[in-house]
Image (spheres, rainbow, N blue to C red):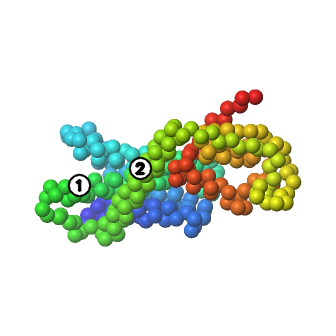
Amino acid sequence: MKLKAAVKMAVDILMTGVLLFLMGYQFWGDAAHEWAGAGMFVLFILHHILNRGWYRALLKGKYSPARIFQLAIDLLLLLNMIGQMISGIILSRHVFAFLPISGGMSFARLLHMLAAGAVIAVYGLFAFVSRDLLTYMFLRTQFVFMDFSEPAILFYLDYLAMMGFFIFAAHYLSKGLKRSGTGRKKQSARILDINVMNRLSVDCDCDGSPAEPDMHDIGILASYDPVALDQACIDLVYAAEDGASLVERIESRNGLHTLEHAEAIGLGSRTYELVSID
């Protein structure tokens, strides 16, 4: 194997390994995650330098539908990686803390979360297409062509990524179908939900002797979406200057998981627009 080809393979294996390490953020903590991310940044740049011929080939040859599809996947993967790196630099509290960056944390966090899942899914789609598995699925050939020189780790990581892609696609397709069905039910039922945010005690209303409220009354909210309604109430409690004790009680009981799960199973959306009718 030529030196350049060996270096390319080594870089690709390292990038794959680092990507898997980065997905286990909860095991390693902030500092290790950031340093690994910085390493991925360097490997990503090196990967593109070693494969610069790909850019030169973009303007050559004919573009068949298959080539256009392959290029679209490549560009999506490129955009995902760039999004990960830009958002990672903005969020950094260790490696890039010296940069004079202020603001944009909320957007960067959302971008980082989105790109983190999408990069696995897009790479899985890339592996699926590049390995031409559709040819076997539709029996366009009676033979299976194998690359016996390919490292086993790259083979299995590609198949893990493909599994990740189909899990990602199935999850969001199922989620979309559930929301669609819920939307139709809501349009036919049109049930109005009302929350009265008065005498807000830290204890449940099922408690026979609840603690006296230590925050002011907020008002009455209504919505056809019960999840959006409860999310709006939560946000108003968090925004209240005297809501600290209720916030502490909610978080100590993992109360926000109820809203997260309700949205996940299609009961409604946590996105809303608050309209005052005073």
Give the farthest residue toward the front. 189
170 relative to 62 in the view: left or right: right
Seen from the viewer's position, the closer of residues 155 and 165 is 165
The quarter in which the C terminus is drawn is top right
What residue do we see at 50% from left, 42% from top? 185
**Helix or strand or loop: what does disc 2 sit on?**
helix
Q: State which tag comes first along the sequence, 1 or 2.
A: 1
| Of labels 1 and 2, the one closer to you | 2
Marks 1 and 2, how far apart at CA: 21 Å
Percent position (x, y) of residue 107? 58, 43
240 displayed left or right of 141? right
Between residues 207 and 234, which one lies in front from this camera angle?
A: 207
**Residue 169's x, y, as percent?**
40, 53
Amino acid type, callout 2: Leu
> Does the image show residue 101?
no
Residue located at (37% from left, 44% from top) = 75
Tell me where residue 255 appears, x and y as whole percent: 68, 57
Please name the residue that numbered disc 1 is placed on: 134
- Residue 243 location in percent, x, y? 80, 49
Write the residue at 57% across / 68% down.
Answer: 27
Left or right placement of residue 193 versus residue 56 in this view: right
Q: Is disc 1 placed on a helix, strand or loop? A: helix
Amino acid type, mark 1 = Leu
Location of the N terminus (image quadrant): bottom left
The answer to whether residue 200 shows anywhere in this view is yes
| Residue 162 vs residue 217, the one in the foreground | 217
Horizontal side of residue 102 vs 178, given as left or right = right
Mark 1: few/some/many CA within 10 Å (<14, 14-19, 20+):
few
Q: Residues within 10 Å of mark 2 (few under 14, many from 20)?
A: few
Which mark is drawn over residue 173?
A: 2
